[in-house]
Structure formats: structure tokens, C-alpha cells
Image (cartoon, rainbow, N blue to C red):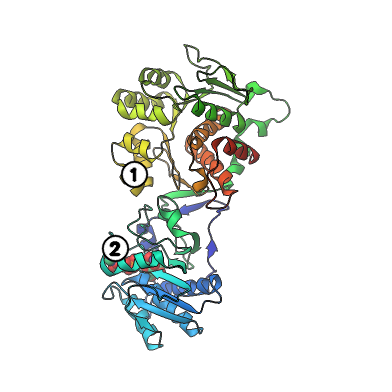
Amino acid sequence: MNKPPRALLPLGGTLLAFDAAATRRLEARAAAPGPQPSLLMERAGLSAARLARALCPGAQQVSVLCGPGNNGGDGWVAAWHLHRWGVAVTAHALGGESRTSDHRAAMARARAAGVPISNEPQPSAQAELVLDALLGIGLRSAPAGELAHCLRALGQHPARKLALDLPSGLEADTGRDWGAAACTDTLTFLSAKPGLFTGAGRALAGRVWLDELGASFGGEPAVAELASSALLASWRALSPRAQSSHATHKGRQGDLWVLGGAMPGAALLAARAGLHAGAGRVYLDGRLEADSLQPELILRALPAEGPPVGSCLVAGCGWGEGQADRLAELLERNQHLVLDADALNSLAADASLRARLQQRAGRGARTILTPHPLEAARLLQTAVAEVQADRLRCAQALAQELNCTVLLKGSGTVAASPGQRPLINTTGHGALASAGTGDVLAGWLGGLWAQAPSADPQRLAALAAVWHGLAADQLPLGSAPLPASQLVQRMHQLHP
Ligand SMILES: NC(=O)C1=CN([C@@H]2O[C@H](COP(=O)(O)OP(=O)(O)OC[C@H]3O[C@@H](n4cnc5c(N)ncnc54)[C@H](O)[C@@H]3O)[C@@H](O)[C@H]2O)[C@@H](O)CC1
Ligand SMILES: [K+]
């Protein structure tokens, strides 16, 4: 008997995510020859039926939408169990002929047991709970015809919706949406799939549950690590404050420089964030006389020779255009550089700047880029939709090409560095969708880096994203956007 599924979000520790190919290898290893349907499908279907009953204990009417493959097979097993337990369930046979022997066996057994079967490509109007078992990791392209019609009807149906393995139409490896209906819950089998946590995944999957079906991933390579609040605990070990809480002074807590430009508010937010992140001294070169709300900031022009060795520099927030020369100098001089916003646009427009960036790692200088999808698309010379269709791959490609760390923002922020396994942030939601929150993230990251210059940039970038998201997670999903200056205060309260 395998363990009951566990809710993955909010994620307490760290968890590895595996792609569909690894999941299939595991499936093949675990599938012992024997009577049909397979043991794994039996476990998956039973687990789904149990979760369905737990989520909606009093449901009078349940619809199970079954596709033609093994995802549909899981649905047939679940429908069979619900029927045996006396639940009024209707199974919908959709998507054409059975594609697998497991599917055929599961459907035949349900039919023989008297499970009511319908060919209607939509859930019953009275259904209080709908199980979406149309397509899983076998998804290849946009569902069409009957399946597309059914997904549209599902999207409009007011019932609670439980997706089996994945919301049908969501791509497991990427989080690309091919027309899935948003579900209230998703029970995923065998492995945590990256597509549930980035791109369209978070919005479509709802609460995510994992049932490993008694299998184990020993030896299989993971494609990503899911980052959670557990990363915050690691900050205690990295921060100088934790190492010497008595005999210390501001000069030991790290210096951060924030370089602003045409729109001083953006740099101001980044500087305030860096200060609240714990940097000992924060210098702001931002065309400002004073910040009466944050008098701790040291307003000073960056010296011609650059900031003192060991300090971290955040550049690009609110710069405006025409800063290529300034960026060229920074790329030559500074050891620890966080580049955001207009600095990224300057890089995208100028191959010689990109060449300078590529060379930095060779002399031990470190760079973290913090693009949102449009900035990443410009850097990769592609369209935003392409970036969003495969965020993991795009973040890794950009990190590889530019030889630096990339923090690709958006739902399921991805931290990638050349040759390292990327991290996907699992915290945060739409309350962060307001002007200036990106400046706060860049400044916070700079503030952390100033204190821990030898930390791994990829983990540090993921930590900043987790921290940023946790501040939003204190608010219910669907809350009004958080003004960026309030975000800084909330992040400060989360210091471990
Ligand atoms: N066989 C087993 O032992 C297990 C299977 N499992 C389930 O099996 C699923 C994978 O099953 P399958 O590989 O059969 O694939 P799916 O059930 O995900 O897809 C069904 C079929 O649809 C086809 N298809 C792909 N895109 C389509 C589209 N846009 N329109 C129409 N048809 C499309 C595929 O070629 C495939 O043959 C997993 O997601 C999981 O739910 C799990 O329960 C674990 C155990
Ligand atoms: K599904």
C-alpha cells in the first residue's frame, strides 16, 4: 500500500523536478509484467478516487473526463472506485479509440461494473466535481476537436476540478499551455513535473498534490530543483551578521551601490530594498538630492574609478536609454554586478556589450541578470511567447550564452547558471504584479550579495526570489497588488 498523496504547496523543503522522459523511464522500470491495468495505473486511479472523495466528500454527482491514453486509464480506474463506493459518477469516453492496453483494460472493467458511460464532450451540468483525465504527459500538440471542446466546457463549468497528473493541455516539461482548463487541484503521479511550477503551470494546476505511487527516482537526473522558504534558512549561514552578531560594524556588512538614471524612483526602490536586505552601507547614485523617507541611504556619485573592491553594484533600474558607455565601464570594472531593466535592454541592443559580459566570468567577475520575459526575449532575439513556452530552457540558454547567472522573472521564476541545475521558485503570486517590484527584487539581491560575495550566484538569486514571493504569500491569492515600497517592509519582517 503506497502512502497517501501529499500537498506540495507551500513547499516546506526542497524537491527535485523530473521531465517526462525520466518519468517514463521510471514508469517502465516499475511496471512489473502482470494483469492489466498495470499496478501503477491501479495505484494512480485509486489515489485519484480517494483524493476526489476527500476534496468533495458530499459530492452527489461526479464527472470523469477520460482521454484515449493512460491518463484516461487513470480516470477509468478512479471512476470504477467511485462507483464501487456508491458515488453517482459518469465517465466520459473521449478522444477516439483506446491507445493503450492498460487504458482498454481499465475501461472494460469499469463498463463491466456498470459505471455509467457518456460520449458527451463536456461534464454533466449537475457535476459538483470533475476529474480531468483527458491528457497527461503524452500531450504532443494543441488539443483539437472533441478534446478542445471538452476543455473549453470544463473551463466554464462551476464545479471543483481535479486534474490527474496534469491539467490536460499543460505541457509537463515546460509549463506551456496548449488550451488547458484551470483546475482547483492537481494530483500528479510519480514525479513533480517542472511545468506545474512555471509558465502557465501555477495558474492552471491550483493546489498540487504528489503521489509517487511507491516508486523512487534513484539515479534519474532531475531537470530542476524547486526552491521554497527552506532556502531562507540557508541565509543564516551565509550572512555575516549570523557569523558575528556582536563584534561587527557597518563596514563588515557589505557595501551596495545602486546606479539610477532618468527615473529616480526605480533606483530608490532598489536602494531601499538593498538596505532592508541588510547591506551595511547603501550608496545611491541616482540624480537625487535626498531621500527624506530613507535618510540612511548615502547619496553619492559613483567615483570615476568605480566603487571600492568588494562592493556589489545594481544597475539599470530606471536608467532610460543611451547608457551603453556607462554599462561598458561597469562591465569592465565591477566584480559583482546585478543588471536589471534598461541595462538589459542596452545589452540586447549591443553585441559588443554582450561580448564584454561573456568575458567577465573568465577573470572571476560575477554577473546576475534579472530579466522579465520581454527583456529575456530581447536578449535571446525571440518573442515573449517563445520564452514563456519554455522558461527553463530559455533561462538556461541565456545563462549559457552570456556566461552568467540569469533570474528569469514571472510566475515560477527560474534561476539558471551555466553548467548548474536550475532552480524554480515556488513562492509568490499575482500580488507582486505592480510597478517597482522588479526594482525591489534587484536591490534585495544586490543587498544580499554585498553581504555574501562568495555565495553561489544562482542560489542567491533563487533565495532573493523566494524571499520576494514569501512577502506576497502572506496575502491571500487574488489580493490587490502590493505597492513596491510596502513589499520592502514585508520582506524585512521575514529576515530569518
Ligand atoms: N502506464 C502506466 O503505468 C502509468 C501511466 N500513468 C498515466 O499515463 C499518462 C501518460 O499516458 P500516455 O502516454 O498514454 O499519454 P496521455 O494519456 O497523456 O495521452 C494520450 C494520447 O493522446 C495522444 N495525444 C497527444 N497530444 C494530443 C492532442 N493534442 N490531441 C489528441 N491526442 C493527443 C498521445 O499521443 C497519447 O497517445 C500519465 O500522464 C499518467 O496520467 C500514470 O498513472 C503512471 C502509471
Ligand atoms: K489530465
Q: What residue is pinned by disc 1? A: 387
Left or right: 289 as drawn, with respect to 43 = right
Up-down: is 135 above or below 228?
below
Q: What residue is pinned by disc 2? A: 143
Decide if ligand 1 comes within 8 Å of the CB at mark 2. Answer: yes
Left or right: 173 as drawn, with respect to 292 = left
- In the depicted view, which residue is nearer to us: 25 or 480? 480
Query: Crowding near pointer 2: few (<14 within 10 Å), some, many (20+)?
Result: many
Res. 173 image quadrant: bottom left
Up-down: is 287 above or below 452?
above
Residue 56 in the image: state x and y as whole percent.
54, 72
Residue 61 in the image: state x and y as whole percent.
47, 78
Up-down: is 245 above or below 38?
above
Query: Crowding near pointer 1: few (<14 within 10 Å), some, many (20+)?
Result: many
Residue 62 in the image: state x and y as whole percent.
46, 76
Residue 27 visible in the shown view: no
Residue 162 visible in the shown view: yes
Can you name the residue that lies furthest to the top here?
A: 304
Left or right: 109 as drawn, with respect to 275 = left
Q: Quadrant of the C terminus?
A: top right
Q: Residue at x 28, y 36 (%)?
A: 381
Q: Residue at x 26, y 74 (%)?
A: 96
Q: Earlier in the sequence, mark 1 or mark 2?
A: 2
Element type where label 1 sits in the image: helix
- Label for residue 167? none
Task: Tell me which amino acid carries mark 1.
Answer: Val
